[in-house]
Amino acid sequence: MLFRGSGTALVTPFCDGKIDWQAFERTLSAQIEGGTKALIACGTTGEPTTLSFDEQREVVEFVLKNADGLCVIAGIGGNNTAEVIKAGRVMGDLGVNGLLAVTPYYNKTTQDGLVAHYEAVADAVDRPVILYNVPSRTGLNLEPATVARLSSHERIVALKEANPSMSQILEDFRLFGDTLDIYSGNDDLLYPFLTLGSQGIISVASNLIPSAMSEIIQTFDEGNWSESLQLSQRFAPLIKLLFAQVSPIPVKAAMSRLGLLENELRLPLLPLSNEETQPLFQEIERLGLA
């Protein structure tokens, strides 16, 4: 097991077009203080498609340097298998604990193609690999039967499941819940995942509320299921607002309200509109976060 608990899909702070390392240090300190168990650098929430490979390497090096012993996982996903392998080897050499590989996108392959892709990556790297299924972003669904085929590979250790279909989630746990760790990829489904036996979450919301996401899992593990559910319900409206636009647009706006970073993204992403910012900030104030 790479980690149990809340893992944060880290945003990449920018200022005047460059990576804001001071803001990055603030966000990492907040994660450590909030009880986060894993830091995911250059996942899709970190805008890796707009980072050069040198920038991606610098981000991972920085996170490793400031992780305070937490599990560090590097995002390496892409639609060019050779480049994914190259990234996996480089990040492995830097010393990450694991690799998160989103399914290829745009050049949508078959399920057999996904098996060939992931097996090629896992064969070529020396770190544990987490499969990442997010069909709303990639246009391609990693089917449970396909994951079951991949689960026998010694370096494929987990799935981040961000398909919200409960029928697919149930099938995940039925087919390979005993052989692979399964992490929720949807913040609003964390509690149902825990009841099915999930190891936790790789979260966007925990950029903003690391303590709350950690506490939902901790109270569940302690057998306080009602308290865990109440916490989930308390933060449900905020989580909904954090996905009013494609991630990380809303969460960066929310983090800027807390003074953690500048509300800056790289094109083609634009900041949240004023109409969408207002209810988000109101919910932040209602929860007493600001």
Image (cartoon, rainbow, N blue to C red):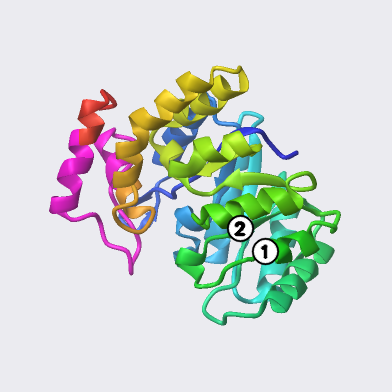
Q: In which quarter of the image is residue 16?
A: bottom left
> What x and y, as percent, mark residue 231?
41, 25
Magenta highlight range = 253-282
C-alpha gap between disc 2 and disc 1: 16 Å
Q: In which quarter of the image is residue 235?
A: top left
Residue at 48% in and 29% down: 29
180 versus 44 height, above or below: above
Q: Which residue position is annotated with label 2? A: 132
Q: Which of marks 2 and 1 is in front?
A: 2
44 versus 203 height, above or below: below
- What label does residue 87 carry, if any? 1
Task: Give whichever of discs 2 and 1 has the lower sequence position.
Answer: 1
How crowded pointer 2 is (Cα within 10 Å; few <14, some 14-19, many 20+) is rated as many
- What label does residue 21 carry, if any? none
- Horizontal placement of 55 versus 82: left or right? left
The amino acid pointed to by label 2 is: Tyr
Residue 119 forms part of the magenta stretch: no
- Horizontal placement of 206 versus 266: left or right? right
How crowded pointer 1 is (Cα within 10 Å; few <14, some 14-19, many 20+) is rated as many
Residue 263 forms part of the magenta stretch: yes
> What x and y, as percent, mark residue 121?
76, 66
